[in-house]
Image (cartoon, coloured by chain):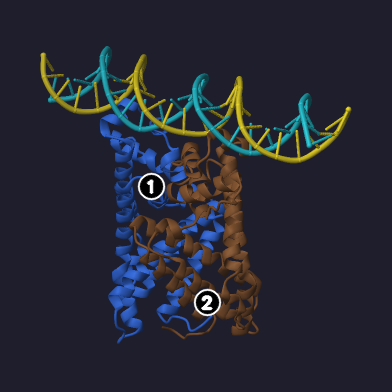
Chain colours: A blue, B brown, C yellow, D cyan
Amino acid sequence: MPTDSATTRERFLDAAIAVMRTKGFHATTVDDLCAAAGLSKGAFFHHFASKEDLAIAAADYWSVTTSRLFAGAGYHDLDDPADRVLGYLDLRASIIGDAIEAYTCLVGTMAQETYATHPAIRDACAASILGHAETLEDDIAAALRDAEPDATGVPARAESLARYTQIVLQGAFVVSKAMNDPDVARDSVAHLRHYFEMVFHRHQGT
Amino acid sequence: MPTDSATTRERFLDAAIAVMRTKGFHATTVDDLCAAAGLSKGAFFHHFASKEDLAIAAADYWSVTTSRLFAGAGYHDLDDPADRVLGYLDLRASIIGDAIEAYTCLVGTMAQETYATHPAIRDACAASILGHAETLEDDIAAALRDAEPDATGVPARAESLARYTQIVLQGAFVVSKAMNDPDVARDSVAHLRHYFEMVFHRHQGT
DNA sequence: GATCATATACCGACCAGTTGGTATCATCGC
DNA sequence: GCGATGATACCAACTGGTCGGTATATGATC
């Protein structure tokens, strides 16, 4: 959300999120970004050493803006850690609207197309995804301990489950882009929620 | 796997799978494909009207080669449909080796970067993914009926679960590319297998 | 007036696609 | 059988436009 008070640098970063989230890194030109930001190429290269440099900055900026969104969400106030995890998933599902470019993930898109050609971008994307996954780990671990008081290896499983949430979301984005259909993404979050319910012993079977 | 008996067209398609699977559609140049195929640009444009046309053909070719791989797999011979579904997942897990570009998915990669810019490629990718998902539906539906003889809406759930398998795999590819680590992909298939075990009532809880 | 921020004009490299041509091979009249 | 004909397969060189990045000019701020 660009605002009038945004710095020039932020205007470029907002533009990068808007355009690259839709078209990807390679299909987005620097001129595209300048047009979206309403600024010139000179300004662009004044603030960023290269297009790759911008992509790395955009991945970091993405982490900042998304973590602000989730940090302020209401599910953190719930008492039961399992409810907090399920609340996170419900929020993720509710974010999925009709416009694909409004709910998909910048860094997942960029990681996929740059992993072999631009390792520095890939690393920034990985840091963003893993950083977000980490914010779920404590609640997942606590919920696992509640469900299975004498379970072993809870921290490792919490980490694995936290990453799995991100994997399902990333996959949902890929397939809903391919099918041009948000329903398949919502559906996959429902499956993931069902999985967590069972892992947390909220359900038996069905 | 290019062979000496491959046609020129197939040599380009094999090259596309090898190069585009790694670098993606936009970062792959026609010259890259010609070099990989050991053929000239004239030959390329003799067989394909455009780079986009090649990508569509490559998506179809991908469907053909992968369906051959899975159609010949041993799990189809198992008696229990749930075992066949789990056998499919075990095969998927076993395919995941150390070389990322050897187990990730061409059409998932291409769908993500072309969905907004090249709808025709996106559609070919969607058809490939959905076609593969469909091959799982009958076994999933049969396993659901075995697990819950009076369940309703089994065909819809089977379709949804079949798509979910592909979503998890696509997400696993994205995140394992970002982290440059195949383990996270194997781990996610294990979660998916666990989910199916529970849905099929093979496990209760843990 | 010096520094920082932004704009405009420009450059060299690259890239999708074209062109004009050659090699190969099947078909067919003789 | 055999050369002429035409179609297909392929190649090397080229083109027109695009893109990342640079050079330089202009305005703002202190």
User: Between A131 and A153, which is closer to the camera in this rendering?
Assistant: A153
Name the image quarter holding residue B80: bottom right
User: Between B107 and A190, which is closer to the camera in this rendering?
Assistant: B107
Binning the other alpha carbons within 10 Å of mark 2 as few (below 14), some (14 to 19) or many (20 upward) gives: some
Name the image quarter holding residue C30: top right
Residue A192 tag number: none
Residue named by callout 1: A114
Q: Are marks 2 and 1 on the same chain?
A: no
Binning the other alpha carbons within 10 Å of mark 1 as few (below 14), some (14 to 19) or many (20 upward) gives: many
The x and y percentages for residue A68 are: 31, 54
Residue at 34 percent of width and 84 percent of height: A148
The x and y percentages for residue A108 are: 40, 53
Above or below: residue A188 compared with residue B117: below
Residue at 57 percent of width and 80 percent of height: B82
Label tally: 2
Residue named by callout 2: B86
Q: Amino acid at mark 1?
A: Thr
Q: Amino acid at mark 2?
A: Leu
The x and y percentages for residue A51 are: 33, 37
Apparent side of residue A34 relative to residue B154 in the rendered image (left or right) = left
